[in-house]
Image (tube, helix red, strand yellow):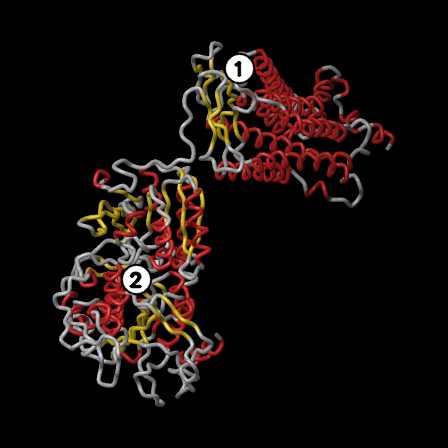
Amino acid sequence: MPRATLVFLCVLHLNTVSGCELFGRFDMPSLFHPGEIMIGGIFPVSYKEIRSTSTFEREPPGVKCAGFDLRAFRWTQVMIFAIEEINKDPALLPNISLGYRILNSCSFPANTLRAALTLASRPEETEFNSSCPPTISAVIAASGSSQSLAVAGTLGPFQVPIVSYFSTCACLSDRAKYPTFFRTIPSDYFQAKALAALVKHFGWQWIGAIQSDNDYGRNGILSFTEEVKKLGVCIAFVGTIARTYSMDKILDVVEMIRRSTVKVILAFVPEGDFYPLMKEVVKQNITGIQWIASEGWITATKPSTPEIYQAFGGALGFVMQKMAMPKLKPFLTNISPYTDPSAAFVKDFWEIMVGCRPVLPEEHRMDKICTGNETLMNSQHAFFDVTQLRATYNVYKAVYAIAHALHQLIFCKPAGQKPVRPCLNVSEIQPKEVTDHLQRVNFRNEFGDDVFFDENGDPPASYDIINWQLRNGQVQHVTLGHFASAANGDFRLNIQEEKIVWRTGKRVPTSVCSNVCPVGTRKAQIKGKPACCFDCIPCAADCTPCPQEYWSNERKDECIPKTTEFLRYHEPMGIALTVVSLLGASLSLVTMMVFIHYRETPVIKASNSELSCFLLFSLFLCFLCPLTFMGKPTVWTCMLRHTAFGVTFALCISCVLGKTIVVVTAFKATIPGNKVAGKFGPAQQRIIVCSCTMIQILICVLWLKFKPPFPDMVFRYSNKKIVLECNTGSEAAFYAVLGYIGILAIVCLVLAFLARKLPDNFNEAKFITFSMLIFCAVWITFIPAYISSPGKFTVAVEIFAILSSAFGLLSSIFAPKCYIILVKPEKNTKKHVMGKKMNKK
């Protein structure tokens, strides 16, 4: 509607320009009363709209509303009642008059949008001049979620606060999209939880669902489905209906219900959309179904008839808590078309209530006319029953919430506190300020009800459980329980199950796709069906499956625990690996003692005694690592084995890297003018070792913090045993530890290879190269062997790789030196160490 948008933009700039040209007006009757502060209201007084091709009143009529909704009309009256009550209250907005303008939405989003644009424009009841009339400070709208989305999406960007009394879609709680939207009815997020709790309470596993073709129905069923899936409940079908649907579409949904095997159906629809389907279900005599209702129709008056009860009696549903408002009844019974002949909707209301059409002086009608003596004082119509108000009470709370927000804004203190002096001029009120104060509203009304909004603009979640019962020939909405949030944030369902009237009789109906398989049969999933649907096929014998940790004995008459498998110390493989591990650790200590004892000899000096001792100590730790891999996995051993392995090997390779750099720089220094060796002394060597090791420690700390290894039971290797192993927690972290060690090893290999042309007798670089080749070969072959090894052999493969690489480093780097020191001491001289090339020089 581009032209309507231009009207709206023109209206919104009335406060910043001297005037604007009005393109036209929507032909919308309204209830209007002037005031210093104006509040708008949008209600579905009509439930049908008749369309033509025009939009503005200076052209042929475009949209007309038809039908009359008594419940919505009562909402308009309670808004007027609340405003008049506030205007008389000396403690709330004293000396400030509230006005209102109430429009009809026709229950359609498009007409609701027209109403919102009309509210933003200059009221028709005021004369057009250069000065600006008071604009609306807030809007009470709308009855449906789709309508509220239209209003919030249109007025929200301009910070106009909207308070809804009957829109429950959880999508409206999105503060990023709808920052000015509030409501006095709980979100469907909580209603979905309540409905799911009801389904769980009665053990229903197989249910159908009906949704309205709008935001209310679609979002409601989506939230409900997410909740019940957690409970293992299956949704058999989801039918979609709307009041505008053709009869063919409605019959398709009826046929879906007839063919289904479900005995419980949830209808998440408003009254107007559901009523055509209800009539057709009754017409086709579809009975024996337990209906679950959303708050949209469970207490609605129109379907609450003995005729509809034939198929929908015993329906269960949730609705906001009721409230009695005794002062409202005299106000309602005083409604008369003769009080204000121009008041919209009142003549239609009078015709329904009294049965005749009031004729005013300027009218001439031929149908049944009133005498003028009719009265509503003694009427017993449900319209005047003010003892069980729900949505009506929500409208009342919405008006008072806006009034309290305005009071705090104008007087800078909550209502009831004295002295009361304005701190803001009424003409300076901006809608954004009203929105900010609405978010902070918190008061207790005369009914003892606390009124406030959470950070999403929602009120506290609290529902009554309603049951349709037939009493004295009338359908009664009987309250049988309560659903509310508990102090710990959970939700609590209390229901008087023994007082429920079931449509299927005195017992709770069952609703399952397939019954529990009898003894001697087992479940067989039906292809293409939900998990709740299965066939029962005969077992090989009359048996029941054992729990996962158990296995049947040979006679198949008892469940016995499965054997557990892990690498034990006392089994042959464990003993062998333990002996080899301790042997390696012992050799490392012996070699370290030899190096310390002969530290002043040329061979030891040439090989950098400090780094050699560091390397031997790290090898000693590497040989001890396999001991943590054996035994029953626990939380601590699982965390220790992988991190200890990663850190000790990082320290080991860091020492080798330091030795390699020392060798390269030492002989680069023989080139005249090269000062590299002087820049790489003991301090720099220690920095290399510490920094390279700290990186690995950091990786391990992050691993342990976010996804640490943990003990795990694995059942996939065999049906008769449980393999106990350490789950790495994070495969990425495990391979990051291995990868980092691999990077250090490759750097060592490359540097050692570059130093291969050193003097003949000094073979340190060659030994390092050979040791790194062994190290890389072992760990390259480890990865596929680790992945393919089953059960405890996975642990054995990892231990073997650790021991092999550690022995490779120990033998390749230190065995030649120990041989010279212990067996050939005559070669332990500076002359021999410097090599033949040095001798020639």
Q: Which residue is mark 2?
A: 165
Residue sticking out furthest to the front: 366
Task: Indicate the quadrant where residue 716 lies.
Answer: top right
Residue occupying image coordinates x 43% and y 87%: 21
Q: Amino acid at mark 2?
A: Tyr
Task: Indicate the quadrant where residue 325 lies.
Answer: bottom left
Q: Which residue is mark 1?
A: 569
Q: Is residue 563 left or right of residue 141?
A: right
Query: How many residues crowd around disc 1 within 10 Å: few (fewer than 14), some, or many (20 or more)?
Result: some
Residue sticking out furthest to the right: 840
Residue occupying image coordinates x 51% and y 40%: 702
As measured in the structure, the alpha-carbon distance from the residue carrying label 1 to the one carrying label 2 is 71 Å
Specify which label sits upstream in the sequence, 1 or 2.
Answer: 2
Q: Is residue 455 left or right of residue 670?
A: left
Q: What is the quadrant of the C terminus in the image? A: top right
Q: Nearer the viewer, residue 617 or 512?
A: 512
Query: How many residues crowd around disc 2 within 10 Å: few (fewer than 14), some, or many (20 or more)?
Result: many
Q: Amino acid at mark 1?
A: Tyr
Residue 691, which numbered label? none
Residue occupying image coordinates x 54% and y 18%: 567
The answer to whether mark 1 and mark 2 are in CB contact below 8 A is no
Does 513 appear above or below 806? below
